[in-house]
Image (cartoon, rainbow, N blue to C red):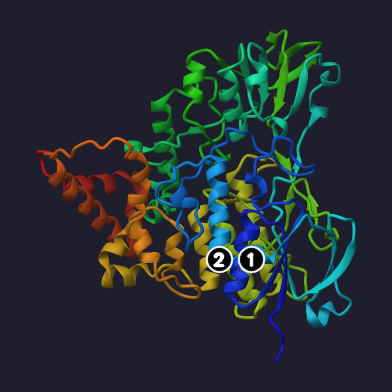
């Protein structure tokens, strides 16, 4: 009898841990190589980061809530906060590692030098993996498959060539990778370049210490909230029904959402209004930035034209003198230095992979890239779903299309991304959480059976269709089914509210409770009908007010 297939996993972070677990689930033999001395990857904070590794700042809090970011068969503890500090994320990773006994399969302080197809690759699909241990000893091992889990935060992108005079700047400058805490910059003047999530976080934090912070942006940005309606996590308030309607009526929904964002604060007045539409750029999630701008501690500025001594000249001609620090929040680039460039060519952060995972030109699908995506949503469950699919492909239980079929899919995704997103280095691996998860789940055979649930377990079916798209939905059926998935879905809101109950307030009867219930049921009934009778969309698309009129027809007149 042939022994279990050996799978090399490169990286012990978010994606690597999921890959180890999925290999074990499928009876494969995982061997994970982690170059550092611990798990966690990007989420492991170090005051002095290792060379050529991404790094985070001390105060970092994740932008996705715990119910949306957990692995699908291991809920995050109920008492953990909804938006977690990196220390809680590391605690969760350690719990996951211990629960599923992943540590014995991880080789720490082991660097992967080369991954090359064996001479008999056309026949076997096997790989030679050359590694180097802490003591400098090198060796080669043979593997049946390889999973690359090095992520996309590999190399800091520091475009100094775009900023004339930076070489004569009298202050200090560095990439956001090297920012850790704000105390050193108390009473100083700081320019933060870049308006992604790191730029917003760092500008806000520095503004509480610095004399003045200038946030420089070329294009502006839409600013989303972590805190949504009624104070709940914003990413828990849009599920499958929302995404289905959004994709059918994207123009209507985008205009409505932009109006809501401008009702919170006028992006034009605040100097943040971009020329592009919402979701044509990866948005910033930041609840504090408008307050810091309103209080004057953060000033929004256009792009930097040049540096002059200790001064900064912006493209609108304004000059700010005596700048002490410039933080470049200009993102990262990725590469695969251990792979030959002909296996996965990378150019300007662009890579051609089938479903963002598989090189289309290999004779055997025994190499998968896991976690090389920038989702509008959480990356952890996406990496896990990719790993679930990849391990079944390695075993021959799932098949990939022909090379031409893969290339056609790659081209279609590239064209769709070009139509939707502003041209930028960061918009090459974008995915939407629910549509992409459904796409992968279809390959694995684990899409939630919504119609069946609505007929056999209406309460659970309602939660799946109209509730948040939590990862547990992909453990309800098919390979890797988890018995606790249904209960995890039914109790997900309990875990959201538990850490908030630090002061218990007595319940009060609401005179509108019956009206709210009737309204919710009416909306649910209408959307369910539309979901399964899609021909009704023609009238809806031509006049979006149709849906509002139908909904209000069911609301009692005294509401």
**Of helix, strand and loop, which one carries label 1?**
helix
The reply to whether dot 1 and dot 2 touch (C-beta < 8 Å) is yes
User: Residue at the location (35% across, 39% down)?
Assistant: 500
Q: Nearer the viewer, residue 559 or 177?
A: 177
With 136 as the anchor, is 163 left or right in this view?
Answer: left
Q: CA distance from mark 1 to mark 2?
A: 9 Å
Where is mark 1, residue-wise? 20
Query: Which circle, 1 or 2, is nearer the viewer?
Result: 2
Q: Can you say whether 373 is above or below 55 in the image? A: below
User: Residue at the location (64% across, 75% down)?
Assistant: 393
Where is mark 2, residue-wise? 100
Q: Can you say whether 390 is above or below 196 in the image? A: below
Q: Nearer the viewer, residue 264 or 39?
A: 39
Question: Farthest residue in the bottom direction?
Answer: 1
Question: Percent position (x, y) of residue 234?
Answer: 41, 41
Q: Is residue 533 visible?
A: no
With 145 as the anchor, is 269 left or right in this view?
Answer: left
Q: Quadrant of the N terminus?
A: bottom right
Question: Percent position (x, y) of residue 301?
Answer: 62, 18
């Amino acid at each position: 009898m042939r022994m279990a297939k050996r799978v090399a996993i490169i990286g012990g972070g978010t994606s690597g841990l999921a890959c180890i677990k999925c290999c074990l689930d499928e009876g494969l033999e995982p061997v994970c190589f982690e170059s550092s001395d611990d798990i966690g990857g990007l989420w492991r904070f170090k005051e002095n980061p290792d060379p050529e590794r991404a790094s985070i700042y001390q105060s970092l809090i994740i932008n996705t809530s715990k119910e949306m970011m957990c692995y699908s068969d291991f809920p995050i503890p109920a008492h953990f906060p909804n938006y977690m500090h990196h220390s809680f994320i590391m605690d969760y990773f350690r719990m996951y590692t211990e629960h599923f006994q992943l540590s014995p399969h991880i080789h720490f302080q082991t660097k992967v030098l080369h991954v090359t197809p064996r001479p008999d690759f056309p026949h076997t699909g096997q790989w030679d993996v050359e590694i180097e241990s802490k003591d400098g000893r090198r060796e080669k091992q043979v593997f049946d498959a390889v999973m690359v889990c090095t992520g996309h935060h590999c190399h800091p992108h520091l475009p100094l060539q775009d900023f004339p005079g930076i070489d004569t700047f009298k202050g200090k400058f560095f990439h956001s990778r090297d920012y850790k805490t704000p105390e050193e910059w108390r009473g100083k003047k700081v320019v933060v370049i870049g308006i992604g999530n790191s730029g917003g976080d760092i500008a806000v934090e520095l503004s509480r210490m610095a004399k003045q912070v200038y946030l420089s942006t070329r294009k502006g940005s839409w600013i989303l909230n972590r805190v949504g309606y009624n104070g709940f996590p914003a990413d828990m308030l849009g599920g499958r029904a929302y995404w289905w309607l959004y994709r059918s009526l994207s123009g209507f929904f985008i205009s409505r959402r932009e109006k809501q964002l401008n009702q919170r604060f006028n992006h034009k007045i605040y100097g943040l209004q971009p020329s592009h539409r919402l979701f044509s750029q990866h948005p910033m999630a930041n609840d504090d930035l408008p307050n810091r701008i309103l209080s004057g501690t953060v000033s929004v500025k256009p792009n930097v034209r040049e540096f002059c001594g200790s001064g900064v000249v912006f493209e609108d001609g304004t000059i700010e003198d005596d700048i002490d620090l410039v933080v470049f929040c200009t993102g990262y680039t990725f590469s695969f230095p251990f792979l030959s460039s002909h296996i996965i060519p990378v150019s300007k952060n662009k890579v051609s992979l089938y479903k963002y995972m598989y090189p289309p030109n290999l004779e055997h699908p025994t190499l998968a890239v896991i976690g090389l995506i920038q989702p509008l949503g959480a990356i952890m469950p996406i990496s896990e779903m990719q790993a679930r699919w990849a391990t079944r492909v390695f075993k021959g239980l799932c098949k990939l299309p022909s090379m031409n079929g893969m290339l056609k899919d790659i081209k279609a995704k590239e064209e769709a991304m070009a139509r939707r997103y502003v041209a930028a280095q960061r918009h090459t691996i974008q995915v939407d959480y629910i549509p992409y998860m459904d796409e992968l789940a279809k390959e694995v055979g684990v899409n939630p059976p919504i119609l069946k649930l609505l007929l056999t377990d209406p309460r659970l079916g309602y939660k799946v269709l109209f509730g948040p798209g939590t990862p547990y939905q992909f453990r309800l059926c098919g390979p890797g089914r988890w018995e606790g998935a249904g209960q995890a879905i039914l109790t997900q809101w309990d875990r959201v509210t538990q850490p908030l109950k630090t002061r218990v307030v007595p319940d009060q009867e609401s005179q509108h409770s019956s009206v709210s219930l009737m309204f919710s049921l009416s909306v649910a009934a209408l959307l369910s009908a539309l979901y399964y009778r899609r021909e009704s969309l023609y009238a809806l698309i031509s006049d979006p007010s149709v849906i509002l009129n139908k909904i209000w027809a069911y609301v009692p007149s005294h509401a």
